[in-house]
Amino acid sequence: MAYSYDPQNIFARILRGEIPNKTVVETAHTLVFHDIRPHAPVHVLAIPKGAYVNLDHFAAEASAEEIVDFHRTVAKVIADLGLAGETGYRGITNAGRDGMQEVPHYHLHILGGRLMGRLIDPA
Ligand code: 5GP
């Protein structure tokens, strides 16, 4: 699928430093920061620095280096936030209309610190 990327989306602006964020960790290819409207005691967003719209765009077109950096950084954040192992967490990514994606730059929500409930709202 050929996606077009909107360089004015809010996460692109965060990456350019035009909007502040509460950074958890930053690497060569990845930024992890706190969600502005947290849905759990821990709610962070992991984003690649590259211009990818969603998970399938990133998975199909990012370089191996970007993909490894992203996932290794996510693993480190999960450990550093105390969510690894038995404690657990929920990882969510929304895409497009049906996924009700609000910001068109790929992001992985990492939520934890409470029992997360069932997988999806049946509505
Ligand atoms: P989506 O619905 O696209 O999966 O989630 C977008 C997320 O981005 C939401 O959870 C929303 O709270 C978060 N968000 C939107 N604007 C900002 C912002 O300016 N700063 C931060 N840190 N999070 C934002």
Image: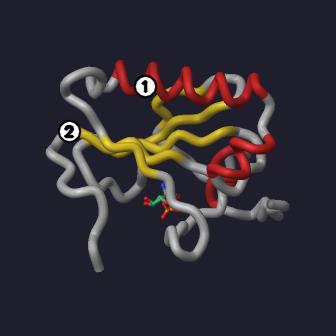
Residue 46 drawn at (x, y percent): 53, 40
The one of 17 and 66 positioned closer to us in this rendering: 66
- The residues tagged by marks 1 and 2 sit, at their Cα atoms, a distance apart of 14 Å
Mark 2 burial class by Cα count in 10 Å: few <14, some 14-19, many 20+: some
Left-right relation of 110 to 115:
right
Pointer 1 or 2: first along the chain: 1
Of all residues, the one furthest to the left in this rendering is 115
Residue labelled with disc 1: 77
**Mark 1 residue CB less than 8 A from any atom of ligand 1:** no
The amino acid sitting under disc 2 is Gly
The one of 65 and 113 positioned closer to us in this rendering: 65
Residue drawn at x 27%, y 74% is 122
Left-right relation of 87 to 72:
left
Residue 114 drawn at (x, y percent): 16, 43
Q: Is residue 116 above or below residue 3?
A: above
Q: Is residue 86 above or below residue 47?
A: above
State the SS at label 1.
helix
Residue drawn at x 39%, y 42% is 110
Residue 31 drawn at (x, y percent): 59, 35
State the SS at label 2.
loop
Residue drawn at x 71%, y 39% is 49
Mark 1 burial class by Cα count in 10 Å: few <14, some 14-19, many 20+: some
Residue labelled with disc 2: 113
The one of 80 and 108 positioned closer to us in this rendering: 108
Q: Is residue 87 above or below residue 95?
A: above
Of all residues, the one furthest to the bottom in this rendering is 123
State which quarter of the image contains the C terminus.
bottom left
Q: Determine which quarter of the picture holds residue 38.
A: bottom left
State which quarter of the image contains the N terminus.
bottom right
Q: Determine which quarter of the picture holds residue 85.
A: top left
The amino acid sitting under disc 1 is Val
